[in-house]
Image: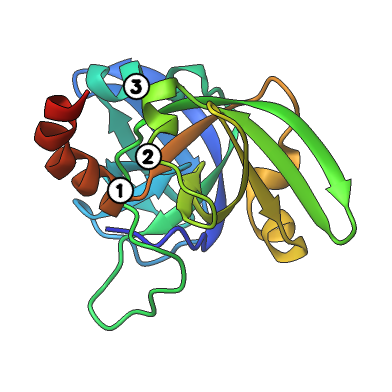
Amino acid sequence: MFTGIIDDIGTIQRVGDGPAGRELRVHCSYEDLEVGESIALDGVCLTVREHGPGRFTVAAVVTTLGRTHVADWRAGTRVNLERALRAGDLLGGHLVQGHVDDVGTVLAVRTEGDARLVDVRLPRELAELIVPHGSIAIDGVSLTVNEIPAADVVQVSLIEYTLRHTTLGDLAPGRRVHVEADVIGKYVQRLMAPYLATVR
């Protein structure tokens, strides 16, 4: 479990295929990682397989590659990093599972006052889980839904701190991003499905 509060930006050093899947070696500032711990890379929960001073290795299996854009990562790609939540840690964002629901596409980026507004197109079934001023994770970053400009578009507002401490400052039209909807919305949708099926 994560919070969507990014604590480091990593850089992919090496990408290769092995028996564990697509293996990624990542440069980071962490010095006390442990083998087997969970870590989110751009919102994708992966397991540390090996580590050393300022680096670690993870692997993404075919299922992960199919629902994310991890397969597009190359040496030099920057990724948002977050270590798993520990008991007693501050929950500064919202509950993020690290289970990417789908990939969205940035439609527009513009500055308005002291905020940067980003419009992201979502798959229709994912868009149904989004509510105004609700929580959403984009590339692992906990954000608040600013507006829903269209049925399949979500708008978020990025503050200066987020732009400096995550990779979201690099967003541009056409960029693909990992999206995870609020887990509470998923459970509500699941519980309501039998009722909604009888009234349609």
Location of the N terminus (image quadrant): bottom left
Q: Mark 3 points at which residue?
A: 67
* Residue 140 visible here: no
Q: Tell me: 28 left or right of 174.
A: left
Q: Please tell me in which quadrant of the rendered image residue 130 appears.
A: top left
Residue depth check, mark 2 versus mark 3: number of the one nearer the observer: 2
> Tag 1: Cα neighbours inside 10 Å, few (<14), some, or many (≥20)?
some
Badge 2 amino acid: Leu
Image coordinates for residue 200, horizontal then vertical, percent: 22, 23
Residue in view at x 84 percent, y 40 percent? 110
Q: Is residue 168 above or below residue 70?
A: below
Q: Residue 163 carries which label?
A: none
Residue in view at x 53 percent, y 48 percent? 80
| Upstream in sequence: badge 1 or badge 3 | 3
Of 184 and 87, which appears nearest the observer?
Answer: 184
Residues at marks 1 and 2, CA–CA distance in whole angstroms: 6 Å
Q: Do the residues labelled 1 and 2 touch (CB within 8 Å)?
A: yes
Q: Mark 1 points at which residue?
A: 185
Q: Tell me: 181 left or right of 72.
A: left
Of 129 and 78, which appears nearest the observer?
Answer: 129
Label 1: element kind:
helix
Label 2: element kind:
loop
Q: Name the residue under label 2.
A: 129
Image coordinates for residue 24, horizontal then vertical, percent: 40, 31
Q: Are marks 2 and 3 in contact (CB under 8 Å)?
A: no
Image coordinates for residue 132, horizontal then vertical, percent: 53, 51
| Upstream in sequence: badge 2 or badge 3 | 3
